Image (cartoon, rainbow, N blue to C red):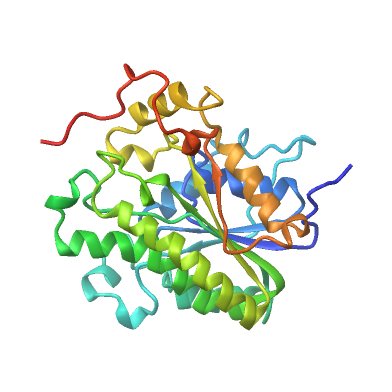
Amino acid sequence: MLPIDLSGKRALVAGVADDGGFGFAIAKSLAQAGASVCVATWPPALTIFRNLLERGKMDESRLLRNGIRFEFERIYPLDAQYDTLESVPAEVRESKRYADVGDFTISGLAASLTADFGEKPLDIVIHALANGPEVKKPLLEVSRQGYLGAVSVSAYSLIGLLQHLGPLMRTGGSVCSLTYMASERVIPGYGGGMSSAKAALESDTRTLAFEAGHKWGIRVNTISAGPYASRAAKAIGIIERMVDYCTANSPLPEPLDAMDVGHTAAFLASPLAAGITGTTMYVDKGYHTMGMAVDPSVAAVSPIG
């Protein structure tokens, strides 16, 4: 038996607001492997997320194979669009959804982690953050603000997290983000500059793997996951059709399960993946290998017009 053993490791999963997405699946897999798990949640979703936990709405989904329900060690507020409180516009900082959550910036997250756990509290960082305010718009119609907003939250935030959390990670640590095949191939309907953001994320993964490896001895990888109809993904507007198309045309003609991604992230975080860094790992039932549709009658999107 060759187990994935993360006993004694602490993970931070940034981008968990419910139990229906890849972020939660990764958190559960890490906990199943023995890690203690902290999560960081977007402030406007924080109260709802805590209410789901307190009311037992996530009790069943948090059950591990041994029948024990895992707990989040800490839940932190995080809006990864901002590095410091000084960079947050006053109307955001003073709004009802942000006013009472404390320092929700990346630097604030780093400060909270060291206050709670000491100087080197982390072994694993998961970047499950993405947002495109104009994701339903074709690239030709995206505003500069919408494009830069997508790149800021979905790509630059990985750099920001590493800048602040890299020094807090123990040697041998692992950083992993989530990307999508729109970074390299056209996915009509996946707009708003998100394809550009994912391309940047993958390119940055390679460079950060080199720099963070030399500076702190940590590994940086990204998982290119197939489409999955999480609550967040429904903002795209065509996610169900994307899932149907990929299911019909993949080498393994079955829908992707979020835990497929969770298990891969746990492997990449483990000593079993000690020689893997700077890599984009596909978890998409093999769809990325296809050059022609098996079932052309299953259309993912309508023509842009």
Place residue 130 in its image quadrant.
bottom left
Image quadrant occupied by the N terminus: top right
Can residue 5 be seen from the camera position used here?
A: yes
Residue 133 vertical position relative to residue 18 in the rendered view, above or below: below
Residue 141 at what x, y percent from top left? 12, 51
Can residue 71 be seen from the camera position used here?
A: no
- Could you tell me which residue is drawn at 18 percent across and 64 percent down? 145
- Could you tell me which residue is drawn at 57 percent across and 58 percent down? 279
Residue 290 vertical position relative to residue 98 in the rendered view, above or below: above
In this image, 224 relative to 297: left or right? right
- Could you tell me which residue is drawn at 35 percent across and 68 percent down? 81
In this image, 142 relative to 37: left or right? left
The extreme right residue here reads: 1
Residue 274 at what x, y percent from top left? 74, 62
Q: Relative to the observer, which residue lies in front, 24 or 266?
A: 266
Image quadrant occupied by the C terminus: top left
Residue 152 at what x, y percent from top left? 33, 66
In this image, 85 relative to 53: left or right? left
Q: Relative to the observer, which residue lies in front, 63 or 140?
A: 140
Residue 229 at what x, y percent from top left? 42, 33
- Could you tell me which residue is drawn at 63 percent across and 50 percent down? 265
What count of labels does the image hold? 0
Q: Relative to the observer, which residue lies in front, 43 or 187?
A: 187
